[in-house]
Image (cartoon, rainbow, N blue to C red):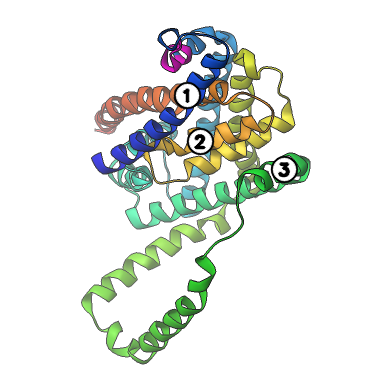
């Protein structure tokens, strides 16, 4: 846990140093003394300046997206013949988000473990449904990336052609990598009968079969259009969280839907990096997205912190803590009612 946190804080600190240097240069050009030019003070003042009504709307969107995610998850369980209570599904999702702040992606495993503990659903099958949950999210994100490139191709292409070099040395490793993969595959094929007899492989096979059963649960969803509706609604709420946060902050309030889509997609890609909640990488990607629309890097850094700490830190810690307390209490009460 500490390693991932160190990585995330380290990336954020390096980003802060870079932004602070730019901020000091800008202050010097304006004739402002360095003692009166503090990026941390600016970020704090920007936090205080946000419109609270837009911020409340953003937090409500966060809650609504996770209500829909819990309902969608329950549909997958029902397709396998399991009954999962909404309270358990919703609270385990919140608990998983909080866990991801410590160790990236560990929250997905924790969700499955909590479902096994409180609903009696096998962990392997539950993990299969979590994989489906994330695969559907990945497809939806891919669609939004395509839409962003379609509607903002000129802006995005112009930025990358100006700021990134396309030269890479990675290509020279492709052919050796393919040859090595082929040799490993051929060796495993000839040894397959011996490998199947290993007890570890047999246990692994049993786990994988349960895992596949969970993944196949999407084929048993009784209301596929409702499942699709939840999937679209979740990401619509994610988009609105970004849109309303942009409206809440004066320097970004004038940006429209197309710009919001670009910033949202960039931020989502930043969160994929294995640091706590995308710490640092999320900030860097959001700054890159906002700079495309002539937002200063200092204001972009403030916006990234406002959105990140409002949702990724405050909401996830708050509702994760509530879930940690509420889950055993609700389960104990339900057990007493059944006695």
Residue underneath mark 1: 305
Q: Residue at x 38, y 42 (%)?
A: 275
Residue toward you, 20 or 49: 20
Look at the image and say whether residue 45 sits in the magenta stretch: no
Give the residue number, with chain letter if any, for mark 3: 158
Q: Residue 210 lies in what quarter of the image?
A: bottom left
Q: Earlier in the sequence, mark 1 or mark 3?
A: 3
Is any part of residue 54 visible from this angle?
Answer: yes
Residue 94 in sight in this render: no
Res. 40 mark: none
Q: Earlier in the sequence, mark 3 or mark 2?
A: 3
Q: Which residues are magenta?
A: 37-43
Question: What residue is drawn where x is 46% and y is 39%?
Answer: 281
Q: Residue 87's spot in the image, x, y percent?
A: 41, 31
- Describe residue 175's horizontal placement relative to residue 274 as left or right: right
What is the quadrant of the N terminus in the image? Answer: top left
Badge 2 element = helix
Q: Is residue 338 above or below residue 120?
A: above
Where's the C terminus, which quadrant?
A: top left
Residue drawn where x is 55% and y is 11% of the image:
50
Q: CA distance from mark 3 to mark 2?
A: 18 Å
Residue that numbered label 2 is attached to: 284
- Helix, strand or loop for disc 3: helix
Q: At x 26% / y 70%, what residue is drawn?
A: 203
């Amino acid at each position: 846990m500490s390693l991932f946190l160190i990585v995330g804080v380290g990336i954020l600190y390096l980003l802060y140093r870079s932004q602070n240097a730019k901020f000091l240069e800008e202050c010097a050009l304006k004739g402002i003394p360095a003692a009166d030019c503090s990026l941390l003070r600016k970020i704090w003042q920007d936090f205080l300046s946000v419109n609270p009504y837009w911020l409340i709307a953003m937090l409500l969107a966060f809650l609504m997206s996770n209500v829909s995610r819990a309902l969608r998850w329950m549909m997958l369980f029902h397709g396998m013949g399991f009954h999962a209570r909404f309270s358990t599904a919703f609270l385990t999702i919140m608990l998983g988000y909080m866990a991801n702040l410590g160790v990236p992606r560990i929250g997905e495993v924790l969700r499955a473990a909590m479902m096994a503990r409180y609903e009696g659903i096998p962990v392997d099958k539950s993990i299969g449904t979590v994989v489906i949950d994330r695969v559907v999210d990945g497809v939806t994100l891919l669609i939004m990336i395509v839409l962003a490139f379609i509607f903002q191709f000129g802006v995005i292409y112009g930025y990358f052609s100006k700021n990134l070099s396309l030269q890479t040395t990675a290509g020279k490793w492709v052919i050796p990598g393919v040859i090595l993969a082929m040799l490993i595959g051929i060796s495993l094929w000839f040894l397959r009968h011996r490998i199947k007899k290993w007890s570890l492989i047999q246990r692994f096979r049993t786990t994988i079969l349960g895992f596949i059963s969970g993944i196949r649960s999407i084929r048993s969803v009784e209301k596929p259009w409702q499942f699709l509706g939840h999937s679209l609604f979740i990401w619509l709420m994610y988009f609105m969280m970004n849109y309303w946060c942009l409206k809440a902050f004066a320097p970004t309030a004038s940006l429209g839907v197309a710009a919001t889509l670009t910033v949202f997609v960039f931020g989502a890609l930043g969160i994929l990096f294995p640091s706590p909640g995308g710490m640092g990488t999320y900030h860097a990607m959001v700054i890159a997205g906002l700079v495309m629309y002539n937002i200063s890097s200092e204001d972009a850094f403030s916006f990234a912190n406002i959105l990140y700490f409002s949702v990724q830190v405050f909401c996830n810690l708050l509702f994760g803590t509530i879930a940690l307390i509420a889950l055993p209490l609700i389960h104990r009460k339900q057990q007493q009612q059944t006695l």
